[in-house]
Amino acid sequence: MPRSAILRCVILRDLADATLVVTQSDHARLAADLLALVRLPGLADHPRRAELLAAVAAHDNGWWEPDAAPRVDPGTGRALDFLAIAPDLRLEIWRRGVERFAAERPYESALVAAHFLRLTSARSDDPALGAARAELERRRDELLDAAGRPAPELAADAGWLALADDLSLAACAADAAFVRQPGWRAEIAPDGAAVELRLDPFPLAGASRLPLRARRIRRGHWSGDAELGRALAAARWEELPVRLAPLAG
């Protein structure tokens, strides 16, 4: 991912004079805000609309704890990206994300499990991942039974979550390559920290502007986790504009 990475979980984007930091929680919130504006058949009058939007807003809840404790590679002084996370920690994060609200919100938790399974589908034949996927498939089905919902409803809603996730990641990282949904084209027009996300098809009633919470820290190397943590703690929260507009042509 050029000029963007994920710091254990937070999304980083280099600006001219700083690095922009977006937590996974704020990425998920933007995803829900984006989906709430979408005017595509089957969504405006969606019978599970409130549940779907709530699930999108919390789909990365397993990352809340790592978000609060970013890490630095001691060998390079650079922030660790998501590829550096040990597989067992990654699975712990997703298990926590599925279970956090499972008792009171089983359908939303089933959607979180479905989201992880989608993200790892290309590696379904990986022996190291196979057992974890099988475990989460069983848990997804248990949660779906507890919610009293059929599998086709979950599959349809997982598609909406995938779209919202892609659009939000593209806006947060200023990287149109995150939009991978078949039939969709995207273009990013960054203006400093602000971003315009141009889409075809354009799923909104008109051009819209949404806020994205973020912080800025200096660019460069860090002496360790503590220094980076102090910088984030001292950084001012901002609300940056994300504009959505049609993609010409």
Image (tube, rainbow, N blue to C red):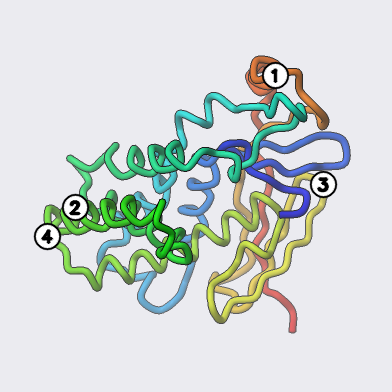
**Image x and y of residue 204, in percent:** 55, 70
Of residues 37 and 78, the one nearer the viewer is 78
Q: Is residue 124 left or right of residue 30?
A: left
Q: CA distance from mark 2 to mark 3?
A: 43 Å
Of residues 2 and 207, the one nearer the viewer is 2
Question: Which element carries disc 2, helix, strand or loop?
Answer: helix
Q: Earlier in the sequence, mark 4 or mark 2?
A: 2
Q: Residues within 10 Å of mark 4 (few under 14, many from 20)?
A: few
Q: Could you tell me the amino acid type at mark 3?
A: Gly
**Image x and y of residue 120, in percent:** 44, 59
Viewer-nearest of discs 2 and 3:
2
Q: Could you tell me the amino acid type at mark 2?
A: Leu
Viewer-nearest of discs 1 and 4:
1
Q: Residues within 10 Å of mark 2 (few under 14, many from 20)?
A: many
Viewer-nearest of discs 1 and 3:
1
The residue tagged 2 is 143
The residue tagged 4 is 148
Question: Image point 27% across, 65% down: which residue?
Answer: 154
Q: Could you tell me the amino acid type at mark 4?
A: Gly
Which label was assigned to residue 224?
A: 1
Question: Image point 64% across, 29% down: which residue?
Answer: 237
Q: CA distance from mark 4 to mark 2?
A: 9 Å
Of residues 182 and 168, the one nearer the viewer is 182
Q: Residue 18's image quarter?
A: top right
Which label was assigned to residue 192?
A: 3
Q: CA distance from mark 1 to mark 2?
A: 40 Å
Which label was assigned to residue 94?
A: none
- Are the residues flagged by discs 2 and 3 in contact, CB closer than 8 Å? no
Q: CA distance from mark 1 to mark 3?
A: 28 Å
Q: CA distance from mark 1 to mark 4?
A: 48 Å
